[in-house]
């Protein structure tokens, strides 16, 4: 009886840990702890100079906008042209890169989270309201 109870407890714990790991894949950014975000026009190339480096307040606003945006399965990567790229440096000195297709006013925008060797490129959909906030953040 004790063995079964222990096995059920271990199985439950493993399921909880596994579910938490999958949860991270649903976010375009890895958390709310970026310490530097550089914005580039178009697809970032080696040696490119950022058009903007977000200050602390802008980083907070950026994280608020993008942290909970939903993944989109209705849009094909081939339909979209990247307008901006972002380099994110986290507090733990980890680096990440994401790309943006910035829509016009009252249009949706889309973030791409880059491919790695284990997964396909993920596309996230930004609402028209949040597109306006992103546009203001990047252009001002």
Image (cartoon, rainbow, N blue to C red):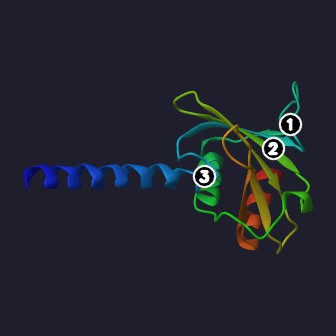
Q: Position of residue 37 (x, y in %)?
A: 69, 39
Residue 139, percent across and down? 83, 52
SS category of the residue bearing label 3? helix
Mark 2: few/some/many CA within 10 Å (<14, 14-19, 20+) = many
Q: CA distance from mark 3 to mark 1?
A: 20 Å
Q: Is residue 124 left or right of 11 when viewed as pictured?
A: right
Q: Nearer the viewer, residue 57 or 78?
A: 78
| Rendered location of residue 81, percent (x, y) | 91, 55
Of residues 128 and 27, the one drawn nearer to the viewer in this rendering:
27
Q: Nearer the viewer, mark 3 or mark 1?
A: 1
Q: In the rendered image, which residue does mark 3 sit on? A: 63
**Splitting the image into 4 quarters, where does residue 46 fall?**
top right
- Using the image, tell me which numbered label, if any, was put on residue 18: none
Q: Which residue is found at the position 64% from the left and 60% from the top?
A: 65
Q: CA distance from mark 2 to mark 1?
A: 6 Å
Left or right of 15? Residue 24 is right
Q: Is residue 5 above or below residue 45?
A: below
Q: CA distance from mark 3 to mark 2?
A: 15 Å
Number of marks drawn: 3
> Could you tell me which residue is drawn at 59 percent across and 54 percent down?
27
Q: Mark 2 or mark 1: which comes first in sequence? A: 1
Q: Foreground mark, 3 or 2?
A: 2
Q: Which residue is mark 2?
A: 85
Q: Say whether residue 140 is visible.
A: no
Q: Secondary structure at mark 1?
A: loop
Query: Mark 1 — residue?
Result: 44
């Amino acid at each position: 009886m004790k063995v079964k109870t222990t096995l059920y407890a271990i199985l439950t714990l493993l399921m909880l840990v596994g579910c938490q790991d999958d949860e991270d894949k649903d976010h375009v950014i890895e958390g709310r702890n970026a310490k530097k975000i550089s914005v580039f026009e178009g697809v970032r190339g080696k040696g490119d100079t950022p058009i903007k480096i977000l200050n602390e307040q802008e980083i907070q606003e950026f994280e608020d906008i993008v942290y909970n945006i939903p993944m989109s399965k209705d849009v094909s990567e081939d339909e979209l042209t990247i307008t901006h790229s972002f380099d994110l440096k986290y507090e733990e000195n980890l680096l990440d890169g994401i790309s943006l297709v910035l829509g016009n006013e009252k249009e949706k925008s889309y973030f791409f989270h880059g491919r790695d060797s284990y997964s396909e490129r993920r596309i996230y959909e930004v609402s028209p309201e949040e597109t306006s906030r992103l546009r203001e953040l990047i252009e001002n």
